[in-house]
């Protein structure tokens, strides 16, 4: 009977293959501690919402999704903390953690913000010099747009962010949506939508490695 359940689990992506189980994903919830990232007031309640809290919520859902699929996962932070007192040292500590762990993939989760409250959309960044990072970014961006119809596709972009250029493995930074847009802020704060985001990112990573696992 155990064999039947193992087979059934494999059909739906749970557990994963032994090859996939050997892969390590480092998830980086952007900001933390003294570094709040973008800060907005929630319409209606006036509650102050920080980017660092949303990125951690999404990162935790992504960790659960990847672990369910059989991947190994490590987080750069799992609480409201900074990794260093100075911003550049904090960013470098995140890449050092991934490099020292021998990660196969590095995913940094962020939220966007703009002076224009109507700005919206999802975009994924990679380091200009990383061909593999570009392919990973394309795979994740495609999965996000397919899974989240109605969200503007801002595309894949190359930029020398510290957490991208100092990592030794394929690395991406995802700007999930605009906190400064009231409608998209509601989307980002919804646990169910965070789950959809997480599943799409996981599918993008899985597809990058050629694994046919449903979202």
Image (spheres, rainbow, N blue to C red):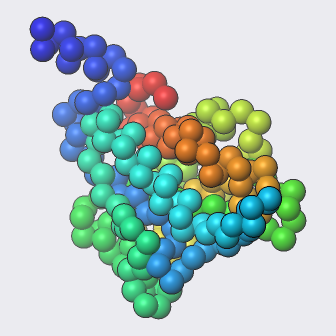
Q: Quadrant of the N terminus?
A: top left
User: Toward which corner of the image does residue 175 lie, by quadrant?
Assistant: bottom right
Nearest the viewer among 179 and 20 is: 179
User: Toward which corner of the image does residue 119 lie, by quadrant?
Assistant: bottom right
Vertical relation: 136 (above or below) 91: above
- Percent x, y for residue 186? 71, 50
Vertical relation: 52 (above or below) 132: below
Residue 91 shows in this picture: no
Nearest the viewer among 11 and 135 is: 11
Residue 72 shows in this picture: yes
- Percent x, y for residue 48? 67, 70
> For the point 52% across and 40% down, which residue is it?
195
Q: How many marks?
A: 0
> For the point 41% across and 52% down, which residue is it?
60
Vertical relation: 205 (above or below) 51: above
> For the point 32% across and 66% down, which residue is it?
98
> For the point 35% across and 26% down, which residue is it?
13
- Percent x, y for residue 43? 79, 60
In the image as oriented, which residue stretches furthest toward the bottom?
86
User: Toward which corner of the image does residue 112 lie, by quadrant?
Assistant: bottom right
Residue 29 placement, left or right of 124? left
In the image as oriented, which residue stretches furthest toward the front?
45
- Percent x, y for residue 197? 56, 43
């Amino acid at each position: 009977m155990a064999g039947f359940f193992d087979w059934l689990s494999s059909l739906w992506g749970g557990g994963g293959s032994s090859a996939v189980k050997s892969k390590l994903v480092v998830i980086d919830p952007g900001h933390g501690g003294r570094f709040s990232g973008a800060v907005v007031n929630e319409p209606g309640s006036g509650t102050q919402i920080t980017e660092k809290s949303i990125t951690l919520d999404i990162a935790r859902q992504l960790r659960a999704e990847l672990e369910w699929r059989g991947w190994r996962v490590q987080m750069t932070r799992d609480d409201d903390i900074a990794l260093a007192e100075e911003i550049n040292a904090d960013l470098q500590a995140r890449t050092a953690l991934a490099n020292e762990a021998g990660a196969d993939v590095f995913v940094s989760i962020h939220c966007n913000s703009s002076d224009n409250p109507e700005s919206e959309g999802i975009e994924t960044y990679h380091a200009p010099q990383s061909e593999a990072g570009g392919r990973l970014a394309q795979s994740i961006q495609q999965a996000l747009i397919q899974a989240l119809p109605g969200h503007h596709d801002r595309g894949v972009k190359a930029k020398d962010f510290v957490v991208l250029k100092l990592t030794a493995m394929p690395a991406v930074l995802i700007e999930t949506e605009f906190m400064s847009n009231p409608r998209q802020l509601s989307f980002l704060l919804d646990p169910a939508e965070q789950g959809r985001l997480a599943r799409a990112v996981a599918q993008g990573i899985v597809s990058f490695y050629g694994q046919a696992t449903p979202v």
